[in-house]
Amino acid sequence: MTWIGARGHARPGRVVLGVVVAMLSALVPATAGHSAPLYPAADPDPIYAQPAGLAEHRPGDVLAVRAMPPLAMFPDTSVTLIQFRSTDSTGDPIAATTTVLQPNNQPADAPVLSYQHIINGLGVQCSVSKVLYTDDPNLMVREAVFWNIALRRGWTMALPDHLGPNYAYGAAKLGGQVTLDGIRAIRQVEQLRVAHSRIAMAGYSGGGMATAWAAALQPAYAPDVEIAGAAMGGVPMNLVTMLEGLGFGPHPVFGLALAAGIGLEREYPERFPISEQMNPRGLAARAAIANACTNDILSVGAGHGILDFAATTSLVDDPRAHAVVEENSLELYDGAPTMPVFEWHSPIDGLIPVDAITATMRRWCAAGAPVVTQSTPTPDHLTAAVLGLPSAVGWLDARLRGEPAPSTC
């Protein structure tokens, strides 16, 4: 049986989604007694806590502002941590955080780039606001160079912790909402002086997924937030086909699928109760990565597969679980951006299904969005990030200067 989406495009059938949910159910360990999801350990810093009275605030309302110590890797730059009200995947209020890097002596209303960093993690220690103050080699080698380029151009950088307070890795729609509310929040912080700034967004891989969701959700979720454009690369546009591609055998990045299952259960505990599916090895793996970041997640999952951790796959026939995977697959979301989009990817990516990217960009073009798509000449997912950055920066610079957006549609 094939399901057809609201716009008439084919959607994966029960068999495919059953495979995916079976995979996810295998990859997420449970607590003893197969009960509630295992959430990340609470951070003692109150700026990461969920304050009382959240429902009294509107999305994007500022809850706390903190000046942070300067960072040597970003010279002549101030650092500000902001807590704000956002919304989770089920519509309930949450508190989230974003970190703002701003060149010293920045004029009022200078350009702003909301950059969604890659966050492959399940704990508070993986947040951008925490990683900035560690010696994380991924940040130092890959991201800090680009951020300094942006800062030297006179751009303020907003870096949201887009996985939300429960570090719901895999809950892609959530990342888009947190990103948009983070933009709302920074406009309200008087000392930043960005209330009337032109704003753009960017991100790659998991950060690109949050960026792409923010772009697609903006017309409905945040019509008050005007964004000059969004640049995104290597985006997992369809979690269904991505997880299907992992198969049931051992895989070197199985840990990321394991983490995605844990994150989805945290965000949808009633509809995605995969803790009930795990065997003792799965429970142990879950406990090992419940607060872990990229390297530890990859290490625990390397060389393993679904059948190593599954006790049962009874979620296969559960339509609620099917819907969760679909709801976080941007290819299957009927909305489309109205802002300009720059998208780049490898033509043959070992991690990301390229067909889903192509289909999504075609749909966005058909909806009227000005889209520029660029293919980078490498099969490697992370190398493609570096190769596409120069073109993305040039495109962002033009949008932030107010130039008309081109299109390759």
Image (cartoon, rainbow, N blue to C red):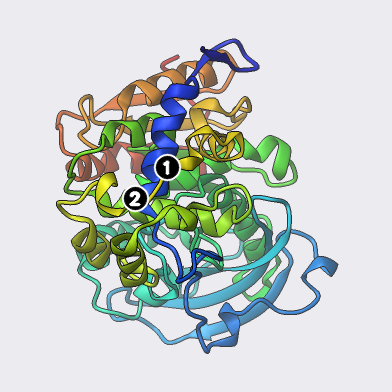
Residue nearer the viewer, 66 or 167: 167
- Give x and y (percent) for residue 365: 52, 17
Residue nearer the viewer, 231 or 354: 354
- Give x and y (percent) for residue 161: 49, 64
- Classed neighbour count for the residue bearing mark 1: other residues with Cα under 10 Å, few (<14), some (14–19), many (≥20): many
**Discs 2, 1 touching: Cβ within 8 Å:** yes
Disc 1 marks a residue whose amino acid type is: Thr
Q: Residue at x 57, y 43 (%)?
A: 214
Examine the image and state in which quarter residue 320 appears: top right
Question: Is 203 above or below relative to 151?
Answer: above
Residue 211 is left or right of residue 181, and the answer is: left
Residue nearer the viewer, 273 or 183: 273
User: Residues under labels 2 and 1: Cα distance?
Assistant: 7 Å
- Give x and y (percent) for residue 322: 54, 34
- Classed neighbour count for the residue bearing mark 2: other residues with Cα under 10 Å, few (<14), some (14–19), many (≥20): many
Q: Residue at x 70, y 75 (%)?
A: 63
Residue 153 is left or right of residue 349, and the answer is: right
- Give x and y (percent) for residue 293: 32, 67
- Position of the C terminus, as image quadrant, is top left
Disc 2, SS: loop
Disc 2 marks a residue whose amino acid type is: Ala
Disc 1, SS: loop
Examine the image and state in which quarter residue 358 appears: top left
Is residue 169 visible in the rendered image? The answer is: no
Q: Find residue 310 and name its label.
A: 2
Q: Residue at x 34, y 53 (%)?
A: 258
Residue holding disc 1: 313
Question: Is 286 above or below relative to 46?
Answer: above
Residue nearer the viewer, 353 or 270: 270
Q: Residue at x 53, y 30 (%)?
A: 340
Is residue 97 visible in the rendered image? The answer is: yes
